[in-house]
Image (cartoon, helix red, strand yellow):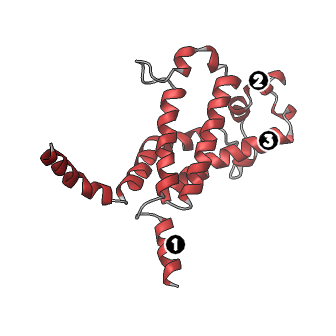
Amino acid sequence: MNTLLSLHNRAFSRIERSEWLLPTLARFVFCAVLLVYFWNSALTKVGDGFLGVFSPSAGAYAQIFPRAFEAVGYDTSQMSVLHWAVVVAGTLAEFILPAMILFGFLTRLAALGMIGFICVQSLTDLYGHRAIEHSATVGAWFDRIQDSAILDQRLFWIAILLVLVFKGAGPLSVDRFLKARSQAV
């Protein structure tokens, strides 16, 4: 038994010392799976023109405030300034936070922002879009079905982001460059 434990410890001690591996892999997985998802989602919210992000599409209100938008007859002019501000902030967050993770810039902060975004997104899906009424969409943990859109998938998303919160961006990042530069001064 001691021989087996010794072999195990020797084999995995290098991995334990590889501090760069987990954050680099977490950023890669986030970008490979979710970067384009969030950017495409943001693009559905952008209005016409160069500054379209500041004149959100009707779809933006329908996605973020489905019940309030329905209540005003799907008339964007009936939505308040607060609704507009939330839609614009959410759209900007969908563009900016994933880009920050891609480049490894203020990664821990960006990952925390994405976790908050995913929580708000999930609550909007559950209560605003009434997904809570569809148990297959919501799912359940510790069941035999692994692919519910809310509980199962988003738990994986948040777990990847938590790696970045706790471990940082890794060596291939703007964060590492800025840290090395600040230490050299």
First in sequence: mark 3 vs mark 2: 2
Q: Which residue appears at 82% of the width and 28% of the height?
A: 75
Residue 171 image-quadrant placement: bottom left
Residues at marks 3 and 1 touching, judged by CB atoms closer than 8 Å: no
Q: Residues within 10 Å of mark 2 (few under 14, many from 20)?
A: some
Gap between marks 3 and 2 measured at Cα: 15 Å
| Residue drawn at the location 42% of the way across and 49% of the way down | 26
**Which residue is label 1 attached to?**
178
Within 10 angstroms of label 3, few (less than 14), some, or many (20 or more) residues?
Answer: some
Residue placed most toward the observer, 58 or 6: 6
Q: Which mark is residue 84?
A: 3
Mark 1 neighbour density, 10 Å: few (under 14) some (14–19) many (20 or more): few
Q: Amino acid at mark 1?
A: Leu
| Dot 3 and dot 2 residues touching (CB under 8 Å) | no
| Residue at figure coordinates x 42%, y 24% from the top left | 146
Viewer-proximal residue, 33 or 136? 136
Residue assigned mark 2: 67
Q: Residue furthest left?
A: 3
As drawn, the residue found furthest toward the front would be 2
Question: Would residue 150 appear left or right of 67 to someone viewing this image?
Answer: left
Which is nearer the eye, 175 or 67? 175
Three-letter amino acid code of the residue under disc 2: Arg
Q: Amino acid at mark 3?
A: Trp
Quadrant into which the N terminus falls: top left
* Residue 77: x %, y % from top left: 85, 34
Tell me the distance, in whole angstroms, between the alpha carbons under discs 3 and 1. Answer: 35 Å
Nearest to the eye among marks 2 and 1: give it: 1
Residue 159 in picture, x, y percent from top left: 48, 41
Numbered badge on residue 138: none
